[in-house]
Image (tube, rainbow, N blue to C red):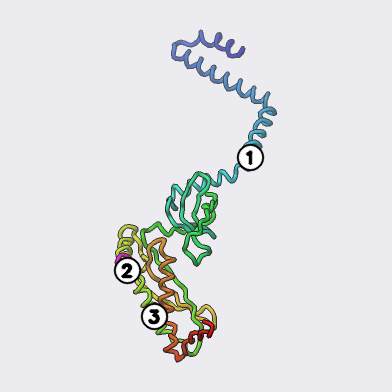
Amino acid sequence: IVIRTIANRIVTPRLGSAEERRRWLAGSRNTTALLVFLGLAAVWANAIHSFLLSVVALAAALVIATKELILCLSGSAVRAIGSSYSLGDRIEWGVVRGDVIDISLLTTTLLEVGPGHDFHMPTGRSIIVPNSKLLDTPVFNESKIGRYVVHTLRIPLELTPDLDLNRAEQAALDSIHVVCREFLEPAHEWKESLEHTHNFIHSPSADPRVYLRVADPRCVEMLLRFPSPVRRQGRIEQEILRHFLRTYLPHPDVAGAERPRPPESSPLQ
């Protein structure tokens, strides 16, 4: 500062114009401020270094302590940006399935549907899932693309010499058409709407189909694919299965077996 003051008194009177004097005063002021800042930084270097290390350590501790909260908030952001699901949707999230009944910044609450993967009835239990699971677990949304889904029912049949696959396949198709006849046409309209509104290249087929798969050398599985309204897969599956068993299994009269006789009444009765 002393050098700047002396230099201003010596140099300023020798400058001819006011513009040159202003330029000199501004340059000397900025140079002095930079030198003062560098001098203070050199004097307090150790203290500044220790302070920065403390700040970094504190920030790292905060990040470690709040890691799960940060991941949950990140999962909420992923859900909001990607519109993964919303209230009322039926989703399958990892090993849990259910209807979304509440969404917060940290968690998602599901009303469980099951038990297990083969049942579609509400169990009455609620499942609270942290939103951080969205970052590493896929979510299957059954309500995302409309009122219908394409459901699959597995029926195993034992491979025996008297197994009639053609009759079993026809009985399965007849069961699907009988149970699903009221919404087969709306399901076809839903398929066409997917191709126009969502630009699906290969939209799911709404036609009832039966496929065969050999899951075991002694067993063949029939895979029944059929359209179903969302949240009604379980009831429709049970109706198709019961209708198939009634029509495919041989009746005692047809098989030649005698019906069990009613028990004779006791003399006391």
Give the side of residue 70 with respect to residue 147, left or right. Answer: right
Q: Alpha-carbon neighbours of circle 1 within 10 Å: few (<14), some, or many (≥20)? A: few
* CA distance for labels 1 and 3: 65 Å
Identify the secondary structure beneath mark 1: helix
Which x, y percent locates residue 179? Answer: 36, 71
Q: Secondary structure at mark 2?
A: helix
Q: Identify whether 21 is placed above or below 134.
A: above
Q: Main secondary structure of the magenta part?
A: helix
Q: How far is the residue under mark 2 from the one under mark 1? A: 59 Å
At label 1, the amino acid type is Ala
What residue would you read off at disc 2? 184
73 sits left or right of 190 in the view: right
Q: Position of residue 229 (x, y in %)?
A: 37, 63
Q: Does the CB distance between marks 2 and 3 fall below 8 Å?
A: no
Please give the range of residues in magenta. 181-188
Residue identified by numbered label 3: 171
Residue 160, x across and y down, in percent? 50, 87
Q: Residue at x 38, y 81 (%)?
A: 170
Q: Which mark is residue 60?
A: 1
* Closer mark to the observer between disc 1 and disc 3: 3
